[in-house]
Image: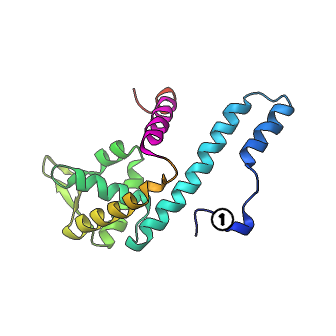
């Protein structure tokens, strides 16, 4: 699936800008905020499509890539599943599903946490480390789906979205 529709199905105008104009013409509140929210959601679709395409050769979803990258970057190559959920900002069940699939692929293995044997952790395997490196290189090549932005623009976008995330209670 392509991240950008084929040329014959692309609109010749910006549909979000058209929606903003219609919103304003009707006198509805929050036209700019509607356009911003809709733009974020559409950009997510486009970026997700590019990222999915880059990860497909590795048989990874972005969720599984994030788990693999987190383990790769951890000091011991291992983390408790509960701690992974907190760091990835997802429910532990989501991490469990990702770990299950990565384990089936031979990229991680489960092991008791050395600090608390009652806790199960995930450990990256050598094959998982190689896959994490290769997948990260593939994502870097497409600039994580941000090809249309230069580095300074990406930094500004991150800062604006960080403000939104903070105000929404994502972090203190």
Q: Measuring from the top left, give residue 33's x and y in whole percent.
A: 67, 32
Q: How many labels sit on residues?
A: 1
Residue 113 in view (yes/no): yes
- Percent across and percent down for residue 13 are 76, 51
Identify which residue is drawn at 41% across, 73% down: 57
Residue shown at 75% from the left, 58% from the top:
11
Q: Nearer the viewer, residue 112 or 39?
A: 39
Q: Main secondary structure of the magenta part?
A: helix
Please identify the residue farthest to the left as the structure is shown: 114
> Which residue bears the numbered disc 1?
5
Could you tell me residue 91's position as x and y percent? 42, 47
Q: x, y (%) of residue 93?
A: 40, 53
Residue found 21% across the figure and 50% down from its top: 74
Left/right of residue 7 with respect to residue 68 in the rendered view: right
Q: Which residues are magenta?
A: 150-164
Q: Is residue 105 above or below residue 170?
A: below
User: Is residue 120 something one can see in this rendering?
Assistant: no
Whether residue 37 appears in magenta in the rendering, the answer is: no
Q: Is residue 1 above or below residue 111?
A: below
Q: Nearer the viewer, residue 112 or 165?
A: 165
- Circle 1 residues within 10 Å: few <14, some 14–19, many ≥20: few
Say how the picture is coloured: rainbow
Image quadrant containing the N terminus = bottom right
Residue 20 placement: quadrant: top right
Q: Give 42 or 157, whichever is nearer the viewer.
A: 157
In the image, is 23 to the left or to the right of 150? right
With respect to residue 6, does 25 lie above or below? above
**Is 159 within the magenta?**
yes
**Going 24% across and 68% down the picture, which residue do you hit?**
130
Which secondary structure lies at badge 1?
A: loop
Q: Is residue 48 left or right of residue 27?
A: left
- 80 vs 87, left or right, is left
């Amino acid at each position: 699936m392509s991240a950008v529709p084929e040329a014959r199905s692309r609109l010749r105008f910006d549909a979000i800008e058209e929606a903003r104009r219609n919103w304003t013409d009707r006198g509805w509140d929050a036209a700019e905020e509607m356009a911003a929210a809709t733009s974020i959601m559409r950009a997510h679709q486009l970026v997700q499509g590019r990222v999915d395409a880059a990860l497909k050769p590795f048989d990874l979803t972005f969720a599984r890539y994030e788990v693999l990258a987190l383990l790769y970057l951890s000091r011991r190559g291992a983390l408790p599943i509960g701690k992974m959920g907190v760091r990835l900002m997802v429910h532990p069940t989501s991490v469990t599903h990702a770990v299950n699939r990565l384990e089936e692929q031979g990229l991680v293995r489960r092991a008791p946490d050395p600090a608390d044997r009652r806790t199960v952790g995930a450990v990256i395997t050598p094959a998982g480390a190689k896959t994490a490196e290769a997948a990260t290189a593939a994502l870097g090549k497409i600039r994580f789906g941000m090809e249309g932005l230069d580095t300074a623009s990406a930094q500004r976008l991150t800062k604006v979205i960080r403000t939104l995330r903070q105000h929404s209670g994502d972090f203190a």
